[in-house]
Image: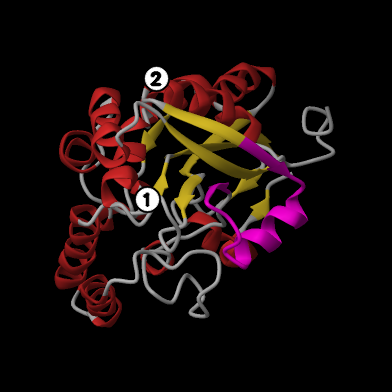
């Protein structure tokens, strides 16, 4: 209401549908940008049962990212690999993700569980914050896990409790929020032995020296083309060892502006905030 009455000059629509509904109600234009954050499923690979690569792979095969995209984002999103697609060339191709690195295959998940445990089902304890948008993901995840032979004991927590447990790595499995990452460094750091901020908090990957070396190479490569290859190589290596951290998807944001708002920076992600001194109003 404030936007339509020109009390506000911009409005972040909930999704593309709302942006489309509003665009004809005034003299507006819309900007579309990738969302650089996402939801992840994190398994604590320093604890059983996640020391077993077969069970990490079973969880990966149980996840159908397209279903989340279709239901939560109304089809307006793309699946994420270990480095999310909004980072551009640093992400692995979507086709490779779907067919080689993280295919959806609940029957394979069942076979892996049987092979690793001798049982037809795997019971896990899932920690998650009750903060949005986690409640939208949860019923889909429970449905997909059940189809793959994974039974879930739920452990919902208020945000501050969840964050403290996540930081201390006091969990078996966590459905986790992420901040905005506009480059591959932090997503890869989650897969390292030191974790995303270098102090062994939140998640520390597989504690694998070969993976650490590949991540170090990516972090110290400066030639643009070689850097892309190093980031790809690190991801492919991690997939070969069955990662314990899996990302779901990233969508798009839609922001509407009155047409008198000029020179809005586009295509910069949140770093565009630093360019807002160039925006002006033609009233």
State the scheme by which the image is colored: secondary structure
Left-right relation of 176 to 261: left
Residue at x-position 39% and y-position 25%: 149
- The picture places residue 47, in percent across and down from the top left corner, at 45, 59
**Which mark's residue is nearer the viewer, 2 or 1?**
2
Residue 157 found in image quarter? top right
Left-right relation of 209 to 86: left
Q: Is residue 155 magenta?
A: yes
Left-right relation of 10 to 182: right
- Give the numbered dot on residue 84: 1
Magenta-highlighted residues: 154-176
Front residue of 245/19: it is: 245
Residue at x-position 23% and y-position 37%: 115
Q: Earlier in the sequence, mark 2 or mark 1?
A: 1
Residue at x-position 27% and y-position 51%: 53
Residue 161 found in image quarter? bottom right
Q: Is residue 47 magenta?
A: no
Task: Kindly tell me whether residue 256 is visible in this rendering.
Answer: no
Relative height, residue 210 to residue 21 (above, below): below
Q: Element type at marker 2?
A: helix
Residue ID for mark 2: 147
Front residue of 78/111: it is: 111
């Amino acid at each position: 209401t404030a936007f339509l009455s020109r009390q506000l000059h911009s409005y972040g629509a909930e999704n593309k549908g709302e942006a489309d509904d509003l665009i004809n109600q005034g003299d507006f234009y819309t900007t579309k940008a990738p969302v650089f954050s996402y939801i992840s499923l994190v398994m604590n690979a320093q604890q059983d049962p996640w020391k077993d690569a077969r069970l990490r792979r079973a969880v990966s095969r149980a996840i159908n990212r397209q279903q989340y995209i279709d239901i939560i984002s109304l089809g307006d999103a793309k699946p994420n690999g270990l480095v999310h697609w909004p980072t551009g060339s640093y992400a692995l191709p979507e086709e490779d993700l779907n067919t080689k690195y993280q295919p959806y295959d609940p029957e394979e998940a069942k076979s892996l569980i049987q092979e690793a445990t001798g049982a037809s089902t795997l019971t896990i304890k899932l920690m998650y914050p009750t903060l949005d948008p986690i409640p939208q993901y949860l019923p889909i995840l429970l449905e997909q896990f059940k189809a793959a032979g994974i039974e879930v004991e739920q452990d919902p927590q208020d945000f501050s409790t969840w964050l403290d447990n996540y930081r201390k790595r006091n969990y078996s499995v966590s459905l986790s929020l992420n901040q905005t990452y506009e480059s591959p460094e932090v997503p890869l750091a989650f897969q390292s032995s030191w974790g995303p901020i270098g102090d062994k908090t939140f998640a520390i990957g597989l504690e694998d020296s070969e993976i650490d070396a590949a991540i170090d190479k990516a972090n110290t490569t400066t030639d643009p083309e070689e850097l892309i290859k190093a980031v790809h190589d690190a991801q492919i290596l991690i997939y070969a060892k069955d990662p314990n951290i899996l990302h779901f998807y990233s969508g798009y944001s839609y922001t509407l502006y009155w047409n008198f708002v000029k020179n809005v920076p586009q295509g910069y992600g949140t770093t565009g905030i630093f360019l807002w001194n160039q925006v002006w109003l033609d009233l």
